[in-house]
Image (spheres, grey):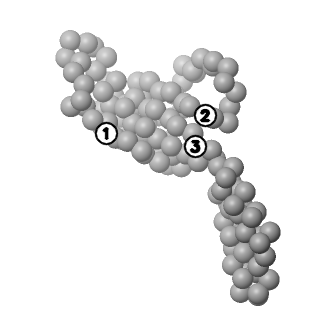
Amino acid sequence: MKSALNEWLNDCINKLKAGELTEIDLNRVVDVLKSEKQIILYLYSKSTNLRSPLGAWALYDPTAPDDPVLPSQDPPYASVLDAVRDGWKIVQFPRPELYSFSDVENAYLNFEFILEKTV
């Protein structure tokens, strides 16, 4: 999606320089921008370190069917940093001070990273 948009924008720039840019050209770019969808990925890391292994995850994809799908036993990435390397952007870092899990053994859920990708 991003490469197609960049290609169309470069085409528009060239047409503008040549005096050939039309409303149709700009409408194509608008259509691409309107068709973008945001995918949200929750990654629960075992610490605030971006290299820490993951304990849990959830993916919300508006482009996929709404039928319930059980998550894989294998995390989509080995760490938050691996997801960032794959093009995900961090929207929210964990705020462990908001949670009190002192009596629970799954305190790793404190370290929730929220990431997004546009497709």
Residue 119: image location, x then y, percent: 64, 47
Return the residue at label 1: 49
Q: Secondary structure at mark 3?
A: strand
Q: Mark 2: which secondary structure?
A: loop
Q: Residue at x 63, y 19 (%)?
A: 69
Residue that sits furthest to the bottom in the current view: 18
Label 2 vs label 1, nearer the camera = 2
Residue 86 appears in view:
no
Q: Position of 97 compared to 83: left or right? A: left
Residue at (27% x, 35% y) in the render = 95
Secondary structure, mark 1, is loop
Query: Which of the marked residues, 3 or 1, is nearer the chain's N terminus?
Result: 3
Which comes before the other along the chain, label 2 or label 3?
Answer: 3
**Which numbered dot is residue 110?**
none
- For label 3, the crowd category at 10 Å Cα-Cα, with few meaning under 14, some 14 to 19 and many 20 or more, is few
Residue drawn at (54%, 19%), measured in percent from left and top? 73
Residue occupying image coordinates x 67% and y 36%: 63
Above or below, 27 against 117 in this view is: below
Cα distance, mark 2 to mark 3?
A: 7 Å
Q: Mark 1 belongs to which amino acid?
A: Asn
Residue for badge 3: 38
Q: Which amino acid lies under the numbered mark 2 shown in the image of this protein? A: Asp
The spot of residue 89 in percent (x, y) is 47, 48
Instruction: Name the residue carrying label 2.
Output: 61
- 41 in relation to 35, above or below: above
**Residue toward you, 44 or 82:** 44
The kind of residue on which mark 3 rests is: Gln
Determine which quarter of the picture holds residue 98. Answer: top left
Q: Position of residue 53 (x, y in %)?
A: 39, 31
